[in-house]
Amino acid sequence: MLADLPLLSLCVWVPIIGGLWVIFAGSRVPAYAVRNDALFISMLSFGLTLLLWRDFDNGVAAMQFTEKLNWIAPFDIFYHIGIDGIALPLILLTSFTTVLIVLAAWEVITDRINQYMGAFLILEGLMIGVFSALDAVLFYVFWEAMLIPMFLIIGIWGGPRRVYATIKFFLYTFLGSVFMLVALLYLYQQTNGSFAISDMHAVLLSLPQQKWIFVAFLLAFAVKVPMWPVHTWLPDAHVEAPTGGSVVLAAVMLKMGGYGFVRFSLPIAPDAAASLNGLMIGLSLIAIVYIGFVALAQEDMKKLIAYSSISHMGFVTLGFFVCFQIFAKTGNWTDAAMGIEGGMVQMISHGFISAALFLCVGVMYDRVHSRQIGDYGGVVNTMPKFAAFMMLFAMANAGLPGTSGFVGEFLVILSAFKASFWFAFFAATTLILGAAYTLWMYKRVIFGEITNAAVKSLEDISTREHTILLALAIPVLILGVWPAPLLDMMHATIAQLVEQLANSKLP
Amino acid sequence: MQNLCLMIVLAPLFGAIVTGLFGRTVGRSGAHWLTIIAVGVSFFLSVVVFWRIVIGGEPSYNANLYTWLESGGIPFQIGFLIDELSATMMVVVTFVSWMVHIYTVGYMHDDPGYQRFFSYISLFTFSMLMLVMANNFLQLFFGWEAVGLVSYLLIGFWYTRDTAIYANLKAFLVNRVGDFGFLLGIAAVLMYFSSLDYAEVFDIASDMTGVTISIWSGQDWSLMTVICLLLFVGAMGKSAQVPLHVWLPDSMEGPTPISALIHAATMVTAGIFMVARMSPLFELSTTALSVVLVIGAITAFFMGLLGLVQNDIKRVVAYSTLSQLGYMTVALGASAYSAAIFHLMTHAFFKALLFLAAGSVIIGMHHEQDMRKMGGLRKYMPITWITCLIGSFALIGFPGTAGFFSKDAIIEAVHASTTPGATLGYLACLFGVFITALYSFRLVFLVFHGESRMDEDTASHVHETPAVVWGPLVALAIPSVIIGAIAIEPMLFGDYFGSSIYVDPENDVLARVGEDYHGVLGFIWHGIWQKPFWFATAGVVVAWYCYLRRPDIPRRIAERTSLVHRMLVNKYGFDVFNDWFFAGGARGTGRLLWQIGDVGLIDGIVVNGSAKFVGWWSGVLRHIQSGYLYHYAFAMILGLLALLAVFVHRVAG
């Protein structure tokens, strides 16, 4: 009976409908009821995604849990969804993060709690929709719709400069996705009237065509990742967003960009990707090194973590695009898989770690109402448990082996070395820079004598906060010690992707 | 064997987790009993393993435990390689760790972070065991970074002290510079060998001698040289070789048991161990060996000199550690890997002893570390005095002590070596012996002999430390004396290491040294007539004369040679330069890139600029939309004309 249910659709629509229900029904019930409802819905959808995981077949490269319904028949637009080894881990990450966001907002958000919770639940459904859409129009609708709740979250519950931040965020991402729309419409024409992403993968395109499409996609995805130099919206958005907003932004929304590359750019325009890989690798390395230095100069904890995110996302794009150089050098495509898998692992791991770090900042912000490093010092004296958790996440951010932060960086550096010593050299500077900015911040905030009255009166984390941080610590450690299950989930799909890259699509 | 290995590594991990997470539940005594028993179990099982492999002659054990992950067709494994080399290291690590655990009960008695401390040192033992028992580069790197983490946590154990949290950040970052090279080395191994498994890599290493790698276009480097140098950068970080040595003296901010365990006996020798483990690779590159030798020589001599001007008792021992690590590195460079491991082992015992003795003095003096405020302590602390004296004799290589055998072996080996730079290494080691004796006995004389320079309040409180503190001192003093005589023959000249260390027959200096070896007594007799012994004696005599008989002399020398003295006090300026150039430079670069790149160019000109441009342009357009029909009509006519012109041009052209 259970098998007949459209499980994937439920994963998409349960949070969206639940979110709407929380918004409308929630205005008449007390706050605790809203919280309980929101928690229930988020747990329910997390449970549904776990069912996806349980029934997912690692050995299959093709889409699973597919559903296809007519949507706008005259244009051959379908409600067509399904997942593969690339989408599943991201979906799990999304639903897991949402539970934590609901918990993190528990007593903190007092203003319009029903709308806040509702917005995040709807956002969750839309994001799962993005990861599971197999029809380009459906994808685009989810992609753009996702901006609305995010826009509201920053705009309503954000900090003092929220208007500047939201407009910047909206314009950046909207500008990018307009080009993506053009590319999708162009592809619709090329495939003789199909919006199916698989048809777009199959269609033959000349090199100039591919290049135009690649660049159009690049504008959309590079903004989301974000890649240097279109990254400046991210620190502003993070600083102004409420904790939950920062968490979802860092943990999931940035991954939309990386997902876009592997779902669209690489398989649709492999020859363009091959010819433009130098640019992509260059931008990735700039992100890693340049942003690493910039992170060192930050005085605002959220900005620092935001810059650290950009730097870490540089590994994702580096891993994705370095494979062309490896192929050029070794002539072996199986080698290339390691870089892509490294990039994917880095996305998942960064989801946990950056979420954890933003939650840590949130824990302190809720107490002291400041994000400035200079306003802290000696927090360990009053919050030892918190300090221990933050140590773990700081070390994970610095890529310590045994935590998930190491796995992706390690695989990408190993692959980058095969392409060029210097790629690996610059990528590996993150070992030093990442440790420097993370641990220097940790030192100034956590260690030392108590510097002021605010720190002196801090209370250690509550059971609720403890639960949230523990829930993040566990996957960070498990993925560090035994990442094989995550990799096994992706092998088949990435092998297929590599095959697509290996075959020229030139007519 | 697998279960045995698992027990050995998991027992301390279990202790660490329980005391770390449930410290309050198990309480103080629970914490130390649990961890001491766990590490004790680990030690006894290590002895069992040692017995079976080294003495029983069982073949080495090499098996994977589980697949960490698989990517690009390459399985990354976690597994154990237990051969003579790792079995030796396991015994040394667990024994010293065990002693330190016991000692800690006394040393940290009044510390509020008691359970946390035991948790950390047990975690350290686990990490170090994972490092030495690894059968592949990945796990080696795991252990490598994990010991770095624990070192970071322990240096900053007293986290409210500014100096401690400065020192631990510095230690971690400097080590990361080393790891940077190390990781690139591992990447190079993976690229060319398509495996990270030791056995597989070493098997085909000799086929790689001719392979070159192009780093600068047009210049080809020998692959093995590049790999070995990159790996050695890692060793330089962990084993504190110049110029990555700067973190080790500062690491003395941690509690003394840590200085003994991590920053003298075990973790800092990880680099030495690693190079010995990689001997099949290093033997293929004379260039790399030469670099190793020269770096070691520089460290051995110049870091020893710094020990002469330190007044903090722990810092003297710390610089001595640096210098001794230099000796081991010289031995590695001279292809005398077994001599390096031999010295590593003897050094682990006597240096842990010296640190714990220094700690005992510090406890006795109620946390006073300045030697200028000590003197005459032998009356108050006889056991500490005797054991410290034994440790010092072992350190300077007094004939018969453990240090004598290992250090003499190194000096003889480097003397016999033909690796480029060997002469420099020989001279550095030889003069280093004098320096070692001088600073060691400067310490002994200043602390235990002569007249007391304590104030009366302190003098009335000084007492011998409790048995839980001096017990480990005695337990470490015994091997500091006898282990050399026992182990020299099998380790250096016998088949002790079997196939775990590979030496190219052409580089086999120890075989050459072994030709003149005629038993332990012969070695001692021979040693008495050799230069190192005379240098050491001279050092002790000079120390006695300068610091007991005529204490005014050192001051006068310092005044006469103020430039040299200042240079030594400033530690050759490494710290000043690093702070200014690297730390300051990085922060400055960051601020510059942020303010000019992000805020100025991208946001200031492009983003906000385009927003302004849109604003300006809409202002212009507003003027055009005047509302007068003839304006629009005129614009339409202009447009039509333009289109027509283009059309005509296209058709005509």
Image (cartoon, grey):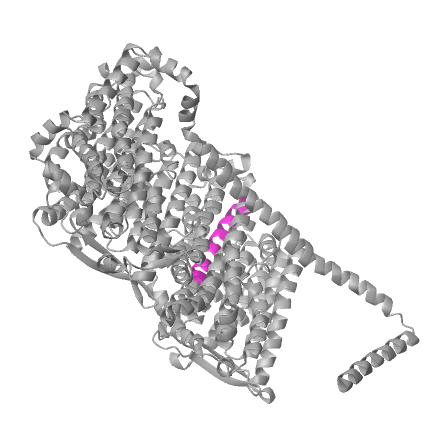
- Taking B235 as reference, is B653 left or right? right
The residue at the point 33 percent across, 35 percent down is B298
Question: Which quarter of the figure has residue A194?
Answer: bottom right
Quick one: A242 or B256, which is closer to the camera?
Answer: B256
Quick one: B203 or B199, which is closer to the camera?
Answer: B203
- Taking B608 as reference, is A143 left or right? left
User: Measured from the top left, where is residue B650 in percent x and y?
Assistant: 75, 84
Quick one: B259 or B118, which is closer to the camera?
Answer: B259
Q: Is the residue A36 above or below the residue B42 in the image?
A: below
Question: Which quarter of the figure has residue A184?
Answer: bottom right
Whether residue A125 is visible here, answered yes or no, is yes
Image quarter (top left, top right, bottom left or bottom right) of the C terminus of chain B: bottom right
User: Does residue B111 belong to the magenta stretch?
Assistant: no
Image quarter (top left, top right, bottom left or bottom right) of the N terminus of chain B: bottom left
How many numbered dots are placed on residues in this image?
A: 0
- Taking A118 as reference, is B363 left or right? left
Whether residue A371 is visible here, answered yes or no, is no
Question: Which quarter of the figure has residue B442?
Answer: top left
The residue at the point 82 percent across, 83 percent down is B644
User: Measured from the top left, where is residue A233 in percent x and y?
Assistant: 61, 58
Quick one: B177 or B286, which is closer to the camera?
Answer: B286
Residue range of the region highlighted in magenta in the rendering = A346-367
User: Measured from the top left, where is residue B472 in percent x and y?
Assistant: 20, 31
Q: Main secondary structure of the magenta part?
A: helix
User: Measured from the top left, where is residue A107 in percent x and y?
Assistant: 53, 52
The residue at the point 40 percent across, 46 percent down is B176
